[in-house]
Amino acid sequence: MVLTVDEGNSEWTGNVGVVTTILDGLDLDTPRAIGIVCGPPVMMKFATLKLLDLGFKRERIYLSMEKNMSCGFGKCGHCRIGIYYTCKDGPVFRFDKISDFPNIWD
Ligand code: FES
């Protein structure tokens, strides 16, 4: 396991930097690897782009997209990603299933 923080304090002995900075140093079998991404939308966007840059297949990247859920049972529509309702069809989606929809990182 590799941990990183955006800003370390005097007690932190691990890596300091955004998550994409630690991916370059990992020995990954990218054709077989699976990426699982969750967190703030901006971090998810850049982590996913980094995984693609490293050779991860789009269908082997999973995104947790619960950020816009409100009612949680398919009535309000706040969680829609294209044809999907995150609350009913997710909240985890394969990247290749949602990547063509606009504003998935909003
Ligand atoms: S959270 Fe309301 S429709 Fe999904």
Image (cartoon, helix red, strand yellow):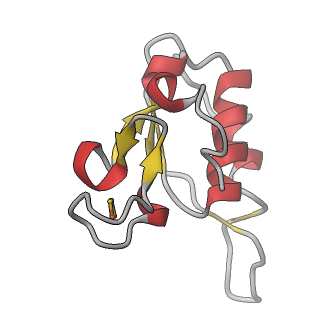
| Quadrant for the C terminus in the image | bottom right
The residue that appears at 37% across and 39% down in the rendered structure is 84
Q: Residue furthest bottom?
A: 10
Compared with 72, 9 (above or below) is: below
The residue that appears at 60% across and 25% down in the rendered structure is 100
Residue 91: % across, % down: 33, 50
Apparent side of residue 55 relative to residue 93 in the rendered image (left or right):
right
Residue 104 sits in which quadrant?
top right
User: Quadrant for ligand 1?
Assistant: bottom left
Q: Residue at x 74, y 23 (%)?
A: 53
Q: How many numbered marks have been drawn onto this rendered protein structure?
A: 0
Q: Nearer the viewer, residue 38 or 25?
A: 38
* Above or below, 104 relative to 35: below
Q: Is residue 60 left or right of residue 28?
A: left
On screen, residue 84 above or below 4: above
In the rendered image, residue 6, in percent from the top left (x then y), is placed at 75, 70
Tell whether 47 sits left or right of 39: right
For this orientation, the residue located farthest to the top is 31
Image coordinates for residue 44, horizontal then vertical, percent? 62, 50
Residue drawn at (68%, 45%) of the image? 45
Is 29 left or right of 85, judged from the image as shown?
Answer: right
Q: Which quarter of the figure has residue 25?
A: top right
